[in-house]
């Protein structure tokens, strides 16, 4: 994947803005923040439990996080469980820290920012961190107005992103990179902002014969 340097939306999503500044790897800044919280070099900080599903790729991501946090003196214990159990515990609010992911259902920023609204609190909705802020709810409701242009909606979503990044209910790690291969004679092959295939306009031309007598 690619680092999520610009917050909530992946770069392929309509409304993505590189002017939204996300998190950067800054070990000195991390140490300063840890010290200001009363845990210089991690001293006195209790071990943290990070739960994840049993996918091998998920495990490799968690191990990388564990090693990075060890560098600033934080001990992270990993626990892998079957994904149905993991999802149930995430939705019920039992866990303090977990690893999960989100893939948009359709190519609109609303489908990502909805995860940070009160009306979508889990277990009935996807707001599993239970962040509740009136300013987020207000911006989200305003952005749903059919009277707005897409640019006006995107501006409201960018404001939401900046609030979410400041509040940090999630630690955004990376966005997936999808690689699609086609033959040279396949034309009109497109992906939407969620990485899904758009096949309505795909067509084939006669293949070029590179063989000679």
Image (spheres, grey):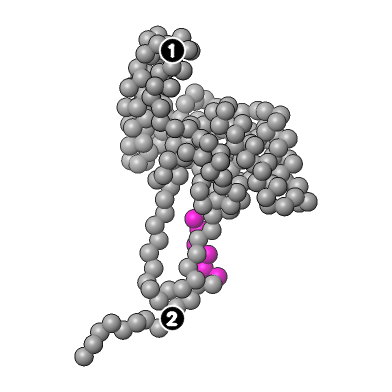
Q: Is residue 92 left or right of residue 137?
A: left
Answer whether residue 199 is magenta in the image.
yes
Q: Nearer the viewer, residue 155 or 176?
A: 155
Answer whether residue 119 is magenta in the image.
no
Magenta highlight: main SS: loop
Residue 145 in sight in this render:
yes
Q: Nearer the viewer, mark 1 or mark 2?
A: 1
Q: Looking at the image, how many numbered discs can be counted on the residues? A: 2
Q: Which residue is mark 1?
A: 35
Residue 124 in sight in this render:
no
Instruction: Tell me if mark 2 has few (under 14), some (14-19) or many (20+) residues whose alpha carbon lies within 10 angstroms of its own.
Output: few
On-image quarter of the N terminus: top left
Residue 120 vertical placement versus 182 (above, below): above
Say what secondary structure mark 1 lies in: helix
The magenta span reads 195-200
Q: Is residue 26 left or right of residue 12?
A: left
Residue 72 vertical placement versus 131 (above, below): above
Q: Which residue is mark 2?
A: 205
């Amino acid at each position: 994947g690619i680092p999520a340097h610009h917050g909530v939306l992946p770069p392929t999503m309509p409304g993505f803005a590189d002017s939204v500044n996300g998190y950067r790897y800054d070990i000195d800044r991390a140490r300063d923040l840890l010290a200001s919280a009363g845990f210089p070099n991690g001293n006195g900080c209790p071990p943290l439990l990070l739960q994840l599903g049993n996918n091998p790729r998920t495990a490799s991501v968690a191990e990388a996080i564990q090693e990075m946090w060890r560098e600033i003196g934080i001990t992270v214990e990993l626990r892998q469980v079957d994904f149905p159990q993991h999802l149930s515990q995430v939705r019920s609010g039992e866990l303090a820290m977990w690893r999960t992911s989100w893939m948009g259902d359709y190519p609109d920023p609303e489908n990502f920012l909805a995860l940070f609204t009160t009306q979508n609190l889990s277990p009935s909705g996807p707001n599993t961190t239970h962040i509740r802020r009136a300013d987020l709810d207000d911006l989200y409701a305003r952005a749903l107005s059919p009277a707005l242009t897409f640019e006006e909606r995107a501006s409201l979503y960018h404001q939401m992103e900046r609030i979410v990044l400041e509040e940090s209910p999630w630690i955004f790690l990376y966005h997936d990179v999808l690689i699609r291969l086609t033959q040279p004679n396949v034309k009109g092959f497109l992906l939407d902002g969620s990485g899904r295939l758009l096949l309505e306009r795909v067509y084939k031309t006669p293949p070029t014969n590179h063989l000679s007598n």
